[in-house]
Image (cartoon, rainbow, N blue to C red):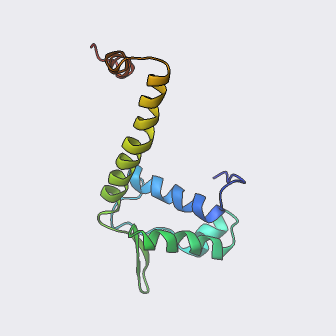
Amino acid sequence: MNFDQKTPIYQQLAESIRQDILSGALPPETAIPSVRQISVEYSLNPQTVLNATQLLIQEDLLEKRRGLGMFVQKNARKQLNRSASDRFKNETIQALVEEAQLLSISRNDLINLINETYGEES
């Protein structure tokens, strides 16, 4: 994992875990490595790892099971997928439409470009 200098490391670690949940690499009910394991593997301060996992617990993506560790919540992937879809619609699609309008690309031409990108015929 390569951490950038712009974003706090705990947020980058939390985002990495979110991506693993969303991709299916961490399925529901799966235990994640312990704070100690993660801190050793990535040479991070354990408090940094704890901050990341606490953030994910607050987001209801992870749950702490006393004496067992932390586990991915049953609905975590669905929850992440929903929020990513909302963000995609509200940010990415909005920006795409605004850029198309600035470039005088019509709605039909934009739809055709999207279909071409998908490999579908319009």
Instruction: From this view, report whether residue 51 is shown above or below residue 100.
Output: below
In x, y percent, where is residue 49?
60, 70
In x, y percent, where is residue 119?
34, 18
Instruction: From this view, report whether residue 55 is shown above or below residue 5.
Output: below
Q: Nearer the viewer, residue 75 or 41?
A: 75
Q: Nearer the viewer, residue 56 or 112?
A: 112
Quarter of the image containing the C terminus? top left
Q: Residue, x 41% and y 48% (percent of image)?
A: 87
Instruction: From this view, report whether residue 60 is shown above or below residue 92.
Output: below
In x, y percent, where is residue 19?
46, 52
Q: Nearer the viewer, residue 90 or 27?
A: 90
44 sits left or right of 67 in the view:
right
Q: Residue, x 59% and y 67% (percent of image)?
A: 38
In x, y percent, where is residue 106?
37, 17
Q: How many marks?
A: 0
Q: Residue, x 40% and y 36% (percent of image)?
A: 93
49 sits left or right of 65 in the view:
right
Q: Indicate the quadrant where residue 20 lies.
A: bottom left
Residue reaching furthest to the right: 5
Q: Residue, x 41% and y 86% (percent of image)?
A: 66
Residue reaching furthest to the bottom: 67
Q: Indicate the quadrant where residue 71 lies.
A: bottom left
